[in-house]
Amino acid sequence: MSSISVGQQRVLSGMRPTGPLHLGHYHGVLKNWAQMQHEYECFFMVADWHALTTNYDDTSQIEGYVWDTVIDWLAAGINPSASTIFVQSRVPEHAELHLLMSMTTPLGWLERVPTYKEQQEKLQNKDLSTYGFLGYPLLQAADILVYRAGNVPVGADQVPHVEMTREAARRFNHFYGKEPGFEEKVTQAIKKMGKKNAKLYKSLRKKFQEEGDHSALETAQALVESQANISLNDRERLYGYLDGAGKVILPEPKALLTPVSKMPGLDGQKMSKSYGNAISMREPRESVEQKIRKMPTDPARVRRDDPGDPENCPVWEFHKIYSPDEVKDWVKKGCTTAGIGCVECKQPVIDGVCAEQQQFVERAQEYVDSPEIVRNIVSEGCDRARDAAKETMDDVRQAMGLSYK
Ligand code: TRP
Ligand code: SF4
């Protein structure tokens, strides 16, 4: 397979390690990742360097948070034999690509990314006028491009980062996409296809370039695709020669927008650890019960016999996720007629959340009991990630004229 089609099949995503994950992470992100691992070649990364961009002043928690994050991914059903789970700082190629791209990326691009100003305003108590924080999106671009990932599942807030990644890749390819001696190398590559195929390739290329015949281009691409004994680099040269684009060193990824999570927090706002409205994925049962019992309900229901409206109640949002239709019907009817009380209404939610948590706890058990299993999973993931990243960096260095020894 060519690296172009490898890239389209490849997924990379990441999360900063901020401690145990909550139900918002599960319903908003992890469920989606678990689904994708069967459809794509997935790389899931703990972005510990990204965590440092805002938490550089205290790094004492970071290691524990990295393992918490990985265990919760495993608990959510991310399967280490289907996906590559790894830690960013253990693949130094990210840093190298970040540095090299920092040479070509205009400052204005970074200053204009919306999260830059937003986060600085939101986290007023921190000094975020640092070099590392400004570079956050470029480091993210390197995370993606170093795997030539075609797809990046992210929430809407991250889309500008993927957009900037595309621009950074385009600019990079523009500067370095023409490798020295390209014509000669591609001539050699054409020869390697054998006489008959070489002739066909040349005539299809001519048809496309002189007559704009797109079906000729497609046929030629399929011909390149079908060559079994050609190296990845030659294959890319053959593709690049067809459409005149040279060699695509860093293909542009696209964002796969994660559907907005239906999971609000206990108070109806977005679930977030910093708002104190979260239930973690493996929270003890008593604590789950206590939190849900304390949840606010429709303010119209002051007394037991005041009717309410589920649409004004955060508990209803939980029913939408956890309850089957019969229970939802029971809630709608009971709430609007004051037929049920809020305490009663919350019970199926408590049971639903606890049943879901049970599977997380069960899946996590062996990892909690034997942390070395987690270390091994991550170690293997890092090796795999590094192999993939190295391939890209060889090409990047070569394209930039930096592969001297
Ligand atoms: N910035 C992302 C977030 O805060 C985390 C992240 C780092 C990431 N590198 C990435 C996401 C690469 C996708 C791809 O959620
Ligand atoms: Fe909310 Fe249920 Fe109470 Fe209605 S009955 S206000 S849906 S908790």
Image (cartoon, grey):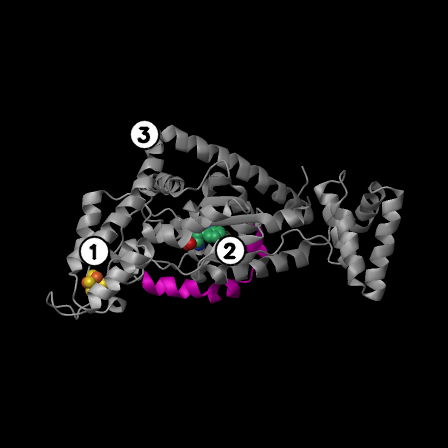
Question: Is residue 332 or residue 230 the one in the foreground?
Answer: 332
- Residue at left offset 17%, top offset 54%: 293
Which dot, 1 or 2, sits closer to the camera? 1
The amino acid at mark 3 is Asp
**Is residue 28 shown left or right of residue 349?**
right
Residue 69 in sight: yes
Query: Majority secondary structure of the magenta segment?
Result: helix
Residue 318 in sight: no
Q: Residue 104 in magenta?
A: yes
> What is the spatial separation of the Cα atoms under label 1 and label 2, in whole angstroms?
45 Å
Residue range (magenta): 98-123
- Which mark is first along the chain, 3 or 2? 2
- Residue at left offset 36%, top offset 33%: 367
> What is the spatial separation of the Cα atoms under label 2 and label 3, in whole angstroms?
38 Å
Residue where numbered disc 1 is placed: 346
Specify the quadrant of the image occupied by residue 299: bottom left
> What is the spatial separation of the Cα atoms under label 1 and label 3, in whole angstroms?
33 Å
Secondary element type, mark 3: helix
Q: Quick check: is the Cβ at mark 1 less than 8 Å away from ligand 2?
A: yes
Residue where numbered disc 3 is placed: 369
Residue where numbered disc 2 is placed: 138
- Residue at left offset 54%, top offset 47%: 39
Secondary element type, mark 2: helix
Q: Do callouts 1 and 3 mark residues in contact (Cβ within 8 Å)?
A: no
Q: Position of residue 158 (x, y in %)?
A: 46, 59
Question: Is residue 314 or residue 161 the one in the foreground?
Answer: 314
Judge whether 137 appears above or below 285 on screen: below
Secondary element type, mark 1: helix
